[in-house]
Amino acid sequence: MSEPGIDLTPGTGDRVAKTTCYMCACRCGIDVHLKDTAGGPRVAYIEGNRDHPVNRGVLCAKGSAGIMQHLSPARLRTPLRRTGPRGSGRFEPIGWDEALATVAGRLSHLRATVPEKLAFFTGRDQSQSFTGFWAQAFGTPNYAAHGGFCSVNMAAAGIYTIGGAFWEFGQPDWDRTKLLMIFGVAEDHDSNPIKMGLGKLKARGARVIGVNPIRTGYNAIADDWIGLTPGSDGLFILSLVHCLLKAGKVDLDYLARYTDAAVLVDEDPASPTHGLLMRTEGGAKTVIDRRTGKPAAFDAPGVRPDLAGRMRRAGTTHRSVFQHIAERYLSDAYAPEAVAGRTGIAPDRIRAVAAELARVAFDEAIELPRPWTDFRGERHETMIGRPVSFHAMRGISAHSNGFQTCRALHLLQILLGTVDVPGGFRFKPPYPKPAEAHPRPHCGVVPGQPLDGPHLGYPQGPDDLCLRDDGSPARIDKAFTWENPLSAHGMMHMVISNAHAGDPYPIDTLMLYMANMAWNSSMNTAAVMDMLTDRDADGAYVIPNVIVADSYASEMVAYADIVLPDTTYLERHDCISLLDRPISEADMAADAIRWPVVAPDRDVRPFQSVLIDLGARLGLPGFVTEDGGPRYADYADYMVNHERRPGIGPLAGWRTGETGIAHGRGMPNGAQIDEYIRHGGFWTAHIPDNAAYYKPWNAAYQDWAVATGLQDKPTPYAFNLYCEPLRRFQLAAEGKGRRQPPDHLRERIKATHDPLPIWYPPLGDGHADPAEYDVHALTQRPMAMYHSWGGQNAWLRQIHGMNPLYVPTRIWDRHGFAEGDWARLVSPSGEMTVPVAHMAALNPDTVWTWNAIGKRRGAWALDADAPEATKGYLLNHLIHELLPPRGDGLRWANSDPITGQAAWFDLRVRIEKVPAASVSHPVLSAQTSPVPPAPRNVAFEMPG
Amino acid sequence: MTTLPATTDRKLGLVIDLDTCVGCHACVIACKGWNTQNYGAPLADADAYGAEPVGAFLNRVHSFEVQPGDGPAQIVHFPKSCLHCDDAPCVTVCPTGASYKRAEDGIVLVNEDDCIGCGLCAWACPYGAREQDPVEKVMKKCTLCVDRIYNDTLPPEDREPACVRTCPTGARHFGDLADPESAVSRLVAERGGFDLMPEQGTAPVNKYLPPRDRDTLDVLAPLLPPVDEGPKGFLGWLDRTLERI
């Protein structure tokens, strides 16, 4: 029989445009295949860019489905003005002139009178160095992005301890590691790079240990699964530390040379610097030099810091940080037997993990023949590697003990000598960069003037808090206050609640950019919706003005008074900048652009360009020329011509040097964006081999970083096992120092701000009786969905259109659940009714569901009877942004007491079986869709 | 009734590593994106934004829970598409000759012009690897990206199925399983690759690599002896050790 002729060589498209994905925060390179049609180029197919440093050609489900996001029926079409009550979703279209004139009029008045009454918060914004620059020029202290409800514990603990953190600031040495241990990692970042790395490990048979109450995804392919009790990771880690110390399996040479382990602690209780590190007259940290037995500066040439160093002074013995560490963690309180109950992990298993960490770190050490010179001027003939690596994300970060837990993990890494060594964890440029080298937070407000410095930063002590003269919080979210001093990313999750309560003060205008605060990005969602619609005695909204910029008809859009419609990610310029959240890899610095590969077919504008327009209308410094005219035509113009410091702009590649093209440092180059497009949408600068490891102490790296424009001078530093900023807050709580905390916070600061990592039970346990609320409840982000964005995607919603509550066998059996059953979940702050499903590969005291599948009816252009809107639900309804009232009249945030990170995963519930329902409860009112109805069927094929 | 070729020159197919697949669905969507745009009718989605969306996919990922008696429960992610069987019952059952197996490379295809949408092939396939397009009502199945692998408009490194090119973990491999020296054949030999449901007698070309043993750490690891339980304890050990450095 003859076979039919088929076309084996169809053309993929007429052209390929290489740009950057925005289907999650990983920022992979994509090849967008375009077809030329009568109406202009159209997007036909998206695949990974093989040359791109982040994804090397691969692409996840979200990325490949970008075409359906680009064509989503939920795309906003035009600027809108609210006509119905807030939350109704009823709007009228207005033109851009009217929209911008309205917004500029309101903001101009605020800037001239009370700039702090503008609260400008951005969600999964990838242009924070720009939006922050705008807010600083405006002069409001009330700016941040979404880090406070995401993973600030991870970022801040890393910066304060090692001068870097997981994901954007570092990664496992995928090519050399022999043992990877992951904590609390679901489909958190780095999405494709983690998968690629796991693939490499699997291909060479390296071991992966997954620590997570839920055995899905990466944990499902882990060789060993530690399904511990939520919130107990810190205790488990410190027990590993106990086992390693007890066996002497720590890297003493690494600790002495590169960390503060040998630095002496002031142990004189009468001293004003009690508990702080001792310093020389020149301000350097003091160690005992083993060569002389005398005190010396840690970083002086030739010094051999003594881990066993002691110094007797004024009747007091001062010991090294390492001796404090040994004393604390050798205690039986951290023995495996002592922690087995809380963690749910058997003592033998904890010992086995510790033994495997030690075996690989010390018995399988590797040595690269790469000579290098350290900051003391000492030459090393090789680079020693301890091939154990770690990665961690939201599972340990989103608890109220998360900062200390993340610190504990970094302590473990450092004791094993595995940070920035071959086979271990590696920094990604512009990191390493210690907390001391970052800005401090700023909150100085003068009407009509810019803020006195960048909003966000890393406080070193009470003097850096954002407090007003009367001691009250300067920021609407109460970041950088005694309630959470190190809130380096702000606290977006508190903005609406605080603004509604007028605590610390009322605001006039809430401006949100791609932040779905009326839904999945808020705790206590139903109450937040009420706060946005609440009116005062005069009938006016308590939060008077709400401006929302978004590309899609999200739940938050329905609560806007003015909607500024953004483009899709394929229709605008963006820069993924080294000034911001870079895409560098461990061997290279990198940045990238997005550019409009197709033009919008709607009356929408890129939000960054809208901010540039508003900046010019408001006359903001940096946005106008000397004669008051607009400084930049649009965001692309800013990307090319803005200079943060002389020679340093948003994009590092293809700048103008004295004799031609220059990279890193250089004057603006009008052809810069064309060069990026010509080179695949990204720029890289490789780190020389002799500078690729030991970067914080490696003279060759430090010199390379200066030449590349990442830093202005070499800044080697020691890792901070001992977190002095925390001790400074403790000292204040003990009554020492100029700035004093309010009395009601003293005991909490003393207990939680320990300069060495500690574990304490999640704070919610003090309010939700663990006997009454005996079940932990978690969410995870699925691999094929990014928060609420994925629900509008015709392809992705067929993978994750439902989110049953997964129930472990013990609870399933105890309640007699069967397939198709429903359960009532009750937390101290609410209850809901949801469908259940059985899952055995789960911690026996934990239930969980997928994050952000549930949708409000009428949102995202989905039909009202879509399963996301009927059976879908958010656990957010059960999570209050405040802890229960204590009768003291104070509002205590449900957050980490150090960073303010939202404690999503502290949630405790009780569960009971209820008769099967047809819809999940609570049922919230529907919103009118501001966009036309979606098509019934989709059969996507771009005509050739 | 349609006949199969007696033999095929090559046996092109996939080797899927169940030890490595994290269940991310990247292959599912890359497949949808390429194949809605190329071979045959677009892969439609009925009720795409409604209560019961039903779309045609050539590849899906299922997750199964395994509960060994002596260890914690496990999850195995199981991507499934047409296995391009040597004895493909979907071909022999086809009443119009629309389903056929290529003699050249063994790929099983549907000639949509001849397909009457009777669904017999889906019924005959023991793997559930065929779906009817909800709009065009023709049968859809994995083509092994026959319009990529020979496509000289693509760079040579891209002439592989879309699912293989995109897989972030590298859990999917493409090659000629008739050649014992091919990379995929060697992988199957090294890792104990197996046929899915061999008792069905379909002789599938695609192979699966089994998950490695899990949760073996406790058995393997020797425990750590303490350095010093004497009176000077840890600090004594520290002093002695530092002397030696």
Image (cartoon, rainbow, N blue to C red):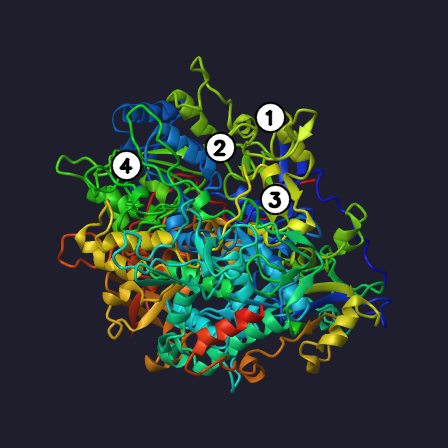
Q: Residue at x 43, y 49 (%)?
A: A862
Give SS at disc 3: strand
Provide the secondary structure element on which disc 1 rests.
loop
Q: Which residue lies most toward the top here?
A: A627
The circle on residue A606 is: 2
Q: Name which quarter of the figure residue A751 lies in.
A: bottom left
Q: CA distance from mark 4 to mark 1?
A: 50 Å
Residue where numbered disc 3 is placed:
A589
Asked if labels 2 and 3 touch by Cβ distance under 8 angstroms, the answer is: no
Q: Position of residue A806 (x, y in %)?
A: 41, 70
Residue receiving disc 1: A667
Q: Nearer the viewer, residue A284 or A676?
A: A284
Q: Chain of mark 1?
A: A
Question: Residue A528 location, x and y as percent?
Answer: 27, 48
Front-most of A452 and A385? A385
Which residue was labeled with disc 4? Answer: A84
Secondary structure at badge 2 equals loop
Residue A764 appears in which quarter of the rendering?
Answer: bottom left
